[in-house]
Image (cartoon, rainbow, N blue to C red):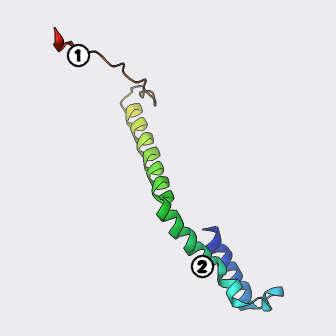
Amino acid sequence: MWLVVAGVVLVGLKLLGLGFMVSVPWWLVLAPFALAAVWWKVADAMGITQRQAMDREDQRAAKRREAQFEALGMRPPPTSRPAKPDRPNRSDN
C-alpha cells in the first residue's frame, strides 16, 4: 500500500512541476505502481494475503466468542487447551 501512496505523491509532484521532479523521467515516477503490482502478485502466490485475512477473521471470531460469554455472565474458556491424553482402547477385554 505504501508503494501506491508513494506513486501518487510522485505523480502529483511531477504534474505540478515542483522542485527536482521536473527532470525525473516518467518511468521512474511510475515505478512504484509497477513494484506494487509485482508485490501483490508475489504476496498472492505465496499466500501471504490469505493468511493475514484468515488471522484477522480468527481474531474477530475470538473477540465475538469472548463477548458472547461475557454477555451470558460466564467466564470465557482458556484460549489454549491442553491436549487430551490418549486413552487405551478398552474393547480388548
Q: Tell me the tag on residue 34.
A: 2
Q: Which residue is mark 1?
A: 89
The residue nearer to you, when weighing 24 against 11, is 24
Q: Determine whether, in the image, residue 85 is placed left or right of residue 92.
A: right
Mark 1 or 2 closer to N-term? 2
Residue 67: x and y in percent read: 42, 37
For the view shown, which residue lies furthest in the right direction? 19
Tell me what residue is drawn at x 42 percent, y 29 percent: 76
Q: Quadrant of the C terminus?
A: top left
- Residue 24 coordinates in the image, percent (x, y): 77, 88
Q: Is residue 42 left or right of residue 74?
A: right
- From mark 1 to mark 2, how far is it between C-alphas? 60 Å
Label 2 secondary element = helix
The three-letter amino acid code for the residue at tag 2 is Ala
Given the image, on which type of amino acid does mark 1 rest? Asn
Residue 29 in the image: above or below residue 93: below
Task: Using residue 38 as the reference point, say whether residue 66 is left or right of it.
Answer: left
Secondary structure category for the residue under label 1? loop
